[in-house]
Image (tube, rainbow, N blue to C red):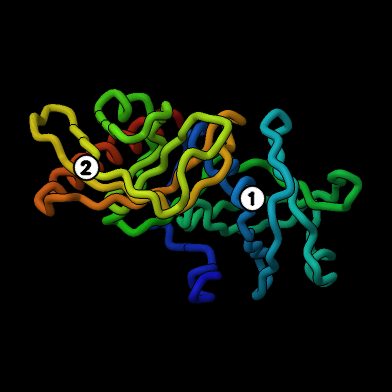
Amino acid sequence: MMDSSNNLKPELDQATLAEFAVHSPTVVQRLCKAMLSEENELYVFLKGVSDYFVTEMLDVRFDEGKIYLGTPYEKRFLNQCTSQTPYWIVAFPEGVKVQFEGKGMESAEFEGVSCLRINIPASLTRIQRRNYFRIYADAVFRAQVQLEIDTLEQRFELLDFSLAGCGLNVWGHQVAHKAGHVFENVRMSLPENDHTMLLDIVVKNIKPSADSEDSHFYGCEIHLKDHHDEARLQRFLLATERRQRAASSSID
């Protein structure tokens, strides 16, 4: 539950929307999957209506280009959900505010139950605190960052990273750890830097991976051993953010 109703409202400042816009189809798909797997509450703001309703994502079908949503409980909202309805949707996948807009909420059916169907957005806005911007670990990032966790015997993949934490995909049918487990003295190196950082990684939550039945997602906090490393890491993350934004813009 969010601590402020103002935080639920969609951001409308055009400069902010432009700064935090995400156009990469890969990232849009990943965030849609996260909303579904985390069973996020979706806050639906119908344009021209002062109030909002709360629902959830029932399914996302990339082959159709459609998202299936539960219908609003209050009939006054349902009557305004038409094929011409413009809307904003706000959610918090992975604890980060995400919003997107669209037009058209069609009546449909999902597993025998009435629902609403909307288009998967071509882009969305991911609003984060600047100091803790979450970087998605694309192919370039994975090639640049070396993360050595000696006490993690299972094969793993780095999914995202920020100054506050990281996401790991850990292979194996069975969960090998519990929330609260600490991987101590993890070594991390960045490109063009002969300095190896030491950090502790604390597992905060574990859930089945949205992308594979043979792995689990570990949501983790990180704690740098040397506070001087924070500036080095921050510079690298900001450079990566700029690179990813430039690559995303070139796709448009």
Q: Residue at x 35, y 51 (%)?
A: 202
- The residue nearer to you, when weighing 82 against 77, is 77
| Amino acid type of the residue tagged 2 in the rendering | Asn
Instruction: Measuring from the top left, give residue 127's x and y in whole percent.
Output: 42, 56
Residue 188 seen in the figure: yes
- The residue nearer to you, when weighing 187 against 181, is 181
Instruction: Measuring from the top left, give residue 119's x and y in whole percent.
Output: 69, 42
User: Neighbour class for label 1 at 10 Å: few (<14), some, many (≥20)?
Assistant: some
Q: Secondary structure at mark 1?
A: strand
Label of residue 178 in the image = none
Q: Residue at x 73, y 32 (%)?
A: 64
Q: Quadrant of the N terminus?
A: bottom right
Whether residue 18 is situated above or below residue 65 in the rendered picture: below
The residue that mark 2 highlights is 185
Q: Secondary structure at mark 2?
A: strand
Whether residue 18 is situated above or below residue 88 in the rendered picture: above
- The residue nearer to you, when weighing 81 against 27, is 27
Looking at the image, is mark 2 or mark 1 nearer the viewer? 2
Callout 2 touching callout 1 (CB < 8 Å): no
Q: Quadrant of residue 236?
A: top left
Q: In screen coordinates, is 196 left or right of 3?
A: left
Q: Residue at x 18, y 32 (%)?
A: 190
Nearest to N terminus: mark 2 or mark 1: 1
- The residue nearer to you, when weighing 166 against 206, is 206
Q: In screen coordinates, is 179 left or right of 183?
A: right
| Amino acid type of the residue tagged 1 in the rendering | Gly
The residue that mark 1 highlights is 102
Q: Quadrant of residue 13?
A: bottom left
Instruction: Measuring from the top left, give residue 130's x and y in whole percent.
Output: 29, 56
